[in-house]
């Protein structure tokens, strides 16, 4: 299994670079001509500075920079329009906040993402390496303006204050369109600087409904074959030459949910998973004391495993995918039959029952991989590195797990 993961990571750059995701779309040239074709659809967290276009699905690709196209779009997915706009530069991270309001801005020509194009307003989004911003273009205006939001430190004590200019800007638009009712006023005053709340106000002004996007979640249930092994580390009598850590085998059931960063692409997703499994651990071997024949420690464990993970589909088509993932498993375990055996050389076996102070909750790094077949079935393997089930003065007891199985995917199917 370790060889499998090593080979997988070696192949990742080649598989990723070789794959494209061209979707039907269009571009609008600097002269205003609309040219249909296909555009490479990428998952991104910042607005593009260029895009790759083909006139037909098998035609040669051409990269268009911002200066070479007024707009482009992917049918039913995304639209971008080029504008020269003012862009605020205030930071968002708490450690980077300025003392006093940072009102600096730059002017740049960028592709703005269209969130809603209405008869009165068009709403855009622009994200760079600093933050996400929203823009509004009024029907008779030549360019959009930013809905301004910023946070800053009032003084050196670190007290933080918000600058909510966007609320005043939206209020002016509502008043200008005779829509500033007491109910709308209450909604605007509590408005957060997020896509859906602002889009709700824009939709009221445009007198149109918000278009429903593709659902960004799917669910799964599955079964797996789990193998685990307990091992002592440090200065323990059970961590000595000649001792054997017996591997345990047990079934596992699992269920969870996947959240897609972009449901239209499905390359990146966030997984939360809950699993149930058990183990029968056994560690035994000879003792250095000549009066002792051997020592043995065995125990049963029943575990509930909560696993948040980040998943990347490095091979990503409509029906089939291949993925890798990383996460941290939170493991809650109930222990039973926790017994140590000591067999004396001259008198025979003497059973001594002891209970170690196990950790009922512990953590373990997790690595996963697998593939999706026909959008409905996932074949997977997970490896959970050693997590400390017991932590003592000069030694510890750890548990590693490896499981493989099949999941049934349902709900949203990209």
Image (cartoon, rainbow, N blue to C red):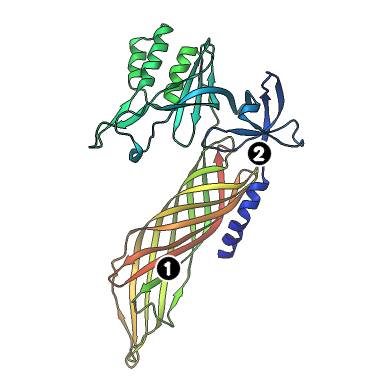
- The picture places residue 106, in percent across and down from the top left corner, at 46, 27
Q: Quadrant of the N terminus?
A: bottom right
CA gap, disc 1 and disc 2? 47 Å
Q: Is residue 74 in view from this perspective?
A: no
Above-or-below relation of 7 to 35: below
Above-or-below relation of 348 to 336: below
Query: Where does label 1 land, which residue?
Result: 280
Which image quarter: residue 301?
bottom left
Looking at the image, residue 179 sits to the left or right of residue 314; the answer is: left
Query: Where does label 2 land, which residue?
Result: 21
Above-or-below relation of 264 to 359: above
Task: Name the foreground residue: 409 vs 207.
Answer: 207
Task: Name the foreground residue: 257 vs 48.
Answer: 48
Label 1's element?
strand
Task: Name the foreground residue: 321 vs 53.
Answer: 53
Task: Name the foreground residue: 1 vs 256.
Answer: 1
- The picture places residue 300, in percent across and down from the top left corner, at 39, 67
The residue that appears at 71% across and 24% down in the rendered structure is 35
| Label annotation for residue 122 | none
Q: Give the residue at the far bottom of this rendering.
A: 346
- The picture places residue 395, in percent across and down from the top left corner, at 33, 72
Q: Is residue 205 in view from this perspective?
A: yes
Q: Nearest to the eye among marks 1 and 2: give it.
A: 2
Above-or-below relation of 159 to 383: above
Callout 2 crowding tier (Cα within 10 Å): few <14, some 14–19, many ≥20: few
Which image quarter: residue 28?
top right
Give the mark nearest the N terminus, 1 or 2: 2
Looking at the image, residue 372 sits to the left or right of residue 94; the answer is: right
Label 2's element?
loop
- The picture places residue 108, in percent across and down from the top left corner, at 52, 27
Q: Quadrant of the C terminus?
A: top right
């Amino acid at each position: 299994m370790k060889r499998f993961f090593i080979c997988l990571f070696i192949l990742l750059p080649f598989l990723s670079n070789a794959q494209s995701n061209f979707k039907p779309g269009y571009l609008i040239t600097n002269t205003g001509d609309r040219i249909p074709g296909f555009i490479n659809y990428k998952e991104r967290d910042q607005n593009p500075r260029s895009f790759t276009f083909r006139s037909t699905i098998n035609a040669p690709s051409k990269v268009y920079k911002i200066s070479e196209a007024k707009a482009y779009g992917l049918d039913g997915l995304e639209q971008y329009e080029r504008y020269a706009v003012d862009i605020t530069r205030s930071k968002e991270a708490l450690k980077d906040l300025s003392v006093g309001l940072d009102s600096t801005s730059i002017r740049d020509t960028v592709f703005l993402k269209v969130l809603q194009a209405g008869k009165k307003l068009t709403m855009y989004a622009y994200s760079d390496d600093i933050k996400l911003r929203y823009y509004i273009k009024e029907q008779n205006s030549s360019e959009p303006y930013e809905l301004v939001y910023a946070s800053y430190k009032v003084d050196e004590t670190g007290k933080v204050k918000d600058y909510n200019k966007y609320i005043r800007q939206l209020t002016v638009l509502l008043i200008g369109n005779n829509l500033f009712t007491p109910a709308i006023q209450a909604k605007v005053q509590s408005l957060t600087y997020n896509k859906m709340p602002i889009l709700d106000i824009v939709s009221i002004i445009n007198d149109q409904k918000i278009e429903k996007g593709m659902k960004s979640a799917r669910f799964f249930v599955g079964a797996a074959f789990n193998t685990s092994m307990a091992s002592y580390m440090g200065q323990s009598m059970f961590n000595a030459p000649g001792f054997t850590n017996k591997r345990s085998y047990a079934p596992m059931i699992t269920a969870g949910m996947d959240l897609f960063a972009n449901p239209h692409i499905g390359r990146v997703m966030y997984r939360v998973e809950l699993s149930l499994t058990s183990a029968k651990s056994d560690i035994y071997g000879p003792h250095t004391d000549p009066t002792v024949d051997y020592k043995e420690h065995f125990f049963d464990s029943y575990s509930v495993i909560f696993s948040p993970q980040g998943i990347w589909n490095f091979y990503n088509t409509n029906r089939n995918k291949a993925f890798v993932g990383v996460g941290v498993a939170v493991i809650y375990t109930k222990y039973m039959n926790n017994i140590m055996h000591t067999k004396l050389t001259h008198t025979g076996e003497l059973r001594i029952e002891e209970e170690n102070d196990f950790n009922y909750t512990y953590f373990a790094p997790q690595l996963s991989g697998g593939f999706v077949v026909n959008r409905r079935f996932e074949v997977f393997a997970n490896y959970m590195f050693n997590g400390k089930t017991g932590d003592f003065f000069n030694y510890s007891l750890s548990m590693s797990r490896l499981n493989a199985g099949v999941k049934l995917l349902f709900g949203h199917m990209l």
